[in-house]
Amino acid sequence: MTAATPAAGRTARGEPKLSVRGLRLEYAADGGRTTALHDLDLDVHEGEFVALVGPSGCGKSTLLKAVSGLVEKTAGSVVLDGERLEGVPEGVGLLFQNDALLPWRTAEDNIRFPLAVAGVAQAEQRRRIAELISAVGLTGFGGHYPRQLSGGMRKRVALARVLAADPGVFLMDEPFGPLDALTRERISADFLALWERVGKTVLFVTHDIDEAVTLADRVVVMSARPGRVIGEYDVDIPRPRAVEDVRFSDAFRRLRGRIARALHHRAEPTA
């Protein structure tokens, strides 16, 4: 888990780490064609945490799949570190709602998987696994199988597995959505603290405005299908943030209201 300079994307602009231009994505449905995304532009900078919100079915998850190469683009481009992406790129980590852990492997062995695929030496695997187990708050549970872990613990294992691959960009599709409210708040707080240390670039999909404003540097609002960007809102709330406190601030309430109005009316101008 390589530490990056925290807040790099927030303190300097320049060439984006990830750039989406004119993205259009269509798929066959009911004997015709459905357009999921249309002429979508988005930039994400090094070390920036960007949250995507929008109405159900607007293409938020489809955008992540297009960036990760899991679906084929109809038109447009995705550029990572100056290179146009075709197919499944290296340096991109995926974390979806389903933790997708291998049930026959322990927590440690699930985390080990990307390290083994990458040919990392055994001693280095053990060191990094121990570091990651500690970082995600699972000390003492490395030998447990997924069936022996709570939903929150399984999500922590899935997060550690993504971190083990040390991607430059995290794509996260409502990763905490299936959790109960209390577990979700706890793991959000832990993830936020971890992210503020390592400073990775994150594109995070959520249906929850509160979660978006609490975690992100910038909240991007998408229109109803076909999805496109209709608003971008900088989150001017100092870091580090305490998840349990930030939602009581005036800045939080003001920004949450602006984003909610944009979602309801689909027409509030970009900040």
Image (spheres, helix red, strand yellow):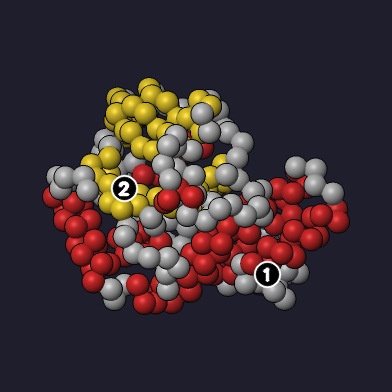
| Residue with the mark numbered 2 | 220
Residue 41 falls in image quadrant: top left
Looking at the image, residue 86 sits to the left or right of residue 38; the answer is right
Left or right: 8 as drawn, with respect to 38: right
What element does badge 2 sit on? strand
Residue 182, above or below 127: below
How far from the left and from the top, in percent, is residue 157?
Answer: 63, 62
Which image quadrant for residue 91?
Answer: top right
Question: What amino acid type is highlighted by mark number 1?
Answer: Ser
Residue at mark 2 to residue at mark 1: CA–CA distance: 32 Å
Q: Along the polypeptide, which appears first: circle 2 or circle 1?
A: 1
Quadrant location, the N terminus? bottom right
- In this picture, residue 57 sits left or right of residue 244: left
**Residue at image point 42% right, 37% down:** 14
Foreground pick, 79 / 241: 241
Across and down, in percent, residue 194 comes to 55, 64
Residue 134 is labelled as 1
Residue 80 higher or lower than 9, as above or below: above
Q: Residue at x 31, y 53 (%)?
A: 234
